[in-house]
């Protein structure tokens, strides 16, 4: 199974993982890393390496908040030295839920990256755009919502 490490500034990663537990229940090899004031890149790298070391896994995917931020930069340093690993930015709940589900079907980090990318983008919905009149039956659009 591929490790998933959610890493963000502050405690967003912890709460994102907690939210997925509410929806899907406990997940194996899903960890979060917080980056708080007073910590530096070396602290993040150590946290990442400690998580990777505790599993006999087939790879690791880092889901981080910001491109160019410390969680991203530290993850890139780990990825550069580790096989079957990658980093994707812009972590959000739909992305993590889809990756958790897809992880059961693949041991290929590159495949999970594509799933993460697509689900992250497709998970963004704009209320006013859901009701663009593309059909004669506007009630169909309303029926698709889980309100």
Image: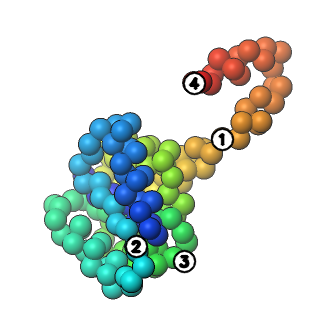
Coordinates of residue 83 in the picture (x, y in percent): 30, 71
Pointer 3 local density, CA inside 10 Å: few below 14, some 14–19, many at least 20: few
What residue would you read off at disc 1? 125
**Which of the marked residues, 3 or 1, is nearer the chain's N terminus?**
3
How far apart marks 3 and 2 lie (CA) works out to 14 Å
Residue at x-position 41% and y-position 63% = 11
Q: Is residue 115 visible?
A: no
Q: Is residue 96 visible?
A: yes
**Which of the marked residues, 2 or 4, is nearer the chain's N terminus?**
2
**Which of the marked residues, 1 or 2, is nearer the chain's N terminus?**
2
How far apart marks 2 and 4 lie (CA) works out to 35 Å
Residue 10 falls in which quadrant of the image? bottom left
What residue would you read off at disc 4? 146
How far apart marks 1 and 2 lie (CA) works out to 29 Å
Residue 67 falls in which quadrant of the image? bottom right
Of discs 3 and 4, which sits in the foreground?
4
How far apart marks 4 and 1 lie (CA) works out to 13 Å
What SS does tag 4 mark? loop
Coordinates of residue 119 in the picture (x, y in percent): 53, 46
State left or right for residue 147 relative to residue 43.
right
Of discs 3 and 2, which sits in the foreground?
2
**Which of the marked residues, 3 or 2, is nearer the chain's N terminus?**
2
Q: Which mark, residue 68?
A: 3
What colour-coding does the image apply?
rainbow
**Which of the marked residues, 3 or 4, is nearer the chain's N terminus?**
3
């Amino acid at each position: 199974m591929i490790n998933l490490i959610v890493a963000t500034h502050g405690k967003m990663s912890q709460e994102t993982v907690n939210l997925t537990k509410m929806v899907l229940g406990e997940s194996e090899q899903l960890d979060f890393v917080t980056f708080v004031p007073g910590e530096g890149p070396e602290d993040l790298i150590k946290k990442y390496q400690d998580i990777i070391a505790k599993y006999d896994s087939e790879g690791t995917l880092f889901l981080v908040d910001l491109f160019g931020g410390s969680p991203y930069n530290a993850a890139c340093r780990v990825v550069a030295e580790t096989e079957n690993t990658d980093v994707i930015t812009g972590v959000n709940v739909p992305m993590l839920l889809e990756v958790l589900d897809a992880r059961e079907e693949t041991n290929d980090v590159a495949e999970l990256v594509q799933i993460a990318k697509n689900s992250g983008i497709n998970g963004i919905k704009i209320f006013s755009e859901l009701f663009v009149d593309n059909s004669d039956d506007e009630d169909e659009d309303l029926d698709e919502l889980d309100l």
